[in-house]
Image (tube, grey):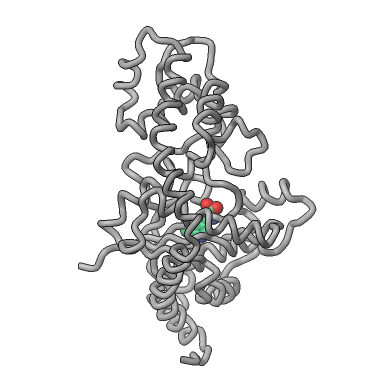
Amino acid sequence: MDKKVILSGIQATGNLTLGNYLGAIRNWIQMQDEYDCYYMIADLHSLTVRNEPEVLRKRAMQVLAIYLASGLDPDKNTIFLQSHVDAHTKLNWILNCYTYMGELNRMTQFKDKSAKHADNINSGLFTYPVLMAADILAYNADLVPVGDDQRQHLEITRDIAERFNGIYGETFVIPEAYIAKQGARIMGLQDPTAKMSKSSTNLNDVIFLTDSPDDIRKKFKKAVTDSENCVRYDKESKPGVSNLMTIYGLIEGKSMDEIEKEFVGKGYGDFKNKTAEVVVKKVQPLQEKYYELLENPEKLREIYEKGAKKARKRANEIVNEVYRKVGLIVDE
Ligand code: TRP
């Protein structure tokens, strides 16, 4: 039987965080044998906000290097840049014509982002979810690993795909959200009620994968907890400690119960130090590989060119079929 197809991606805006690693990339690595995986760097999506061109190019290569340094194998997965596969933008246009303004108006991320970038509410920001739908549907992906914040975008993708299939007959696979066995949403260290975000303005809130060991230790020391001084998992009333436990548990492969037992009678100081140490231990070898890769742009290029070639092959076939169905003449 053919393997199920997975597609996901991360924007090339900002440095990747421990949240990106524990919440996404780490799960991708566990799927690379079982599924046919397409992982892209969503550089086109990054254009919905203003970037320095050189910085954007650099960021795209940094995201690629993080993927590889984290253990994504370019021989097992198709790793590519979104902008290298024209099928995405071709399908984006078609799907725009099958998406209603009213649907897009309901997207909470659009509302949030337009509040944040009030001086630049461009139509790319508005149709962002349609490009995302094109990313997914151009591969007929069965499963899409996404965080909670992207669920609404996956829902609209399904709606668009069903609408299209309803008009033209079975064309798109209706994608489903992939929930990782050990899924986790890593929250900010200063505000543990909001996701750890690479665009956070409070640097102590975020552990970047490229932070030095000392910075990591300092940030964990400053992490917000509570006054109970007892390591106990309770997401509602102890969001800070629960978030640290999630981080510790994911890296060490321990359950919340096990962690509670391990730290009975110990204070937050001990627990924070221990958490910082396991993070440092995890991140250090990743950083070594990351810097090595960034010094080898030829190797990175070889990898993304190979990925784009594979991605184009699959996506072009699917998008050509869509072209035919809607009544365009395919120029092959
Ligand atoms: N919008 C996603 C995010 O910000 C990134 C993304 C773009 C994506 N295209 C995708 C994720 C397709 C999954 C599938 O996290």
Q: Position of residue 327 (x, y in %)?
A: 51, 88
Residue at point 46%, 79% (across, down): 319
Residue farthest to the top, as pictured: 265
Closer to the camera in the image, 88 or 50: 50
Q: From this viewpoint, which residue is outermost toward the left? A: 1
- Judge whether 276 appears above or below 123 on screen: above
- Residue 87 % position (x, y): 50, 76
Question: In the rendered view of the protein, which quadrant contains the N terminus?
Answer: bottom left
Marker count (numbered): 0
Going by the image, does 160 lie left or right of 44? left
Front residue (pair 192, 69): 69
Q: Is residue 269 above or below residue 218?
A: above
Q: Residue at x 49, y 31 (%)?
A: 213
The image quadrant that residue 76 belongs to is: bottom left
Q: Position of residue 272 (x, y in %)?
A: 46, 20
Residue 17 shows in the view: yes
Residue 103 in view here = no
Identify the residue at horizontal 65%, vertical 56% (top origin): 55
The residue depicted at 45 percent of the width and 55 percent of the height is: 293
Residue 59 placed where, x, y %? Answer: 58, 55
Which is more toward the observer, 5 or 54? 54
Classify 9 as above or below 108. Answer: below
Q: Is residue 247 left or right of residue 227?
A: left
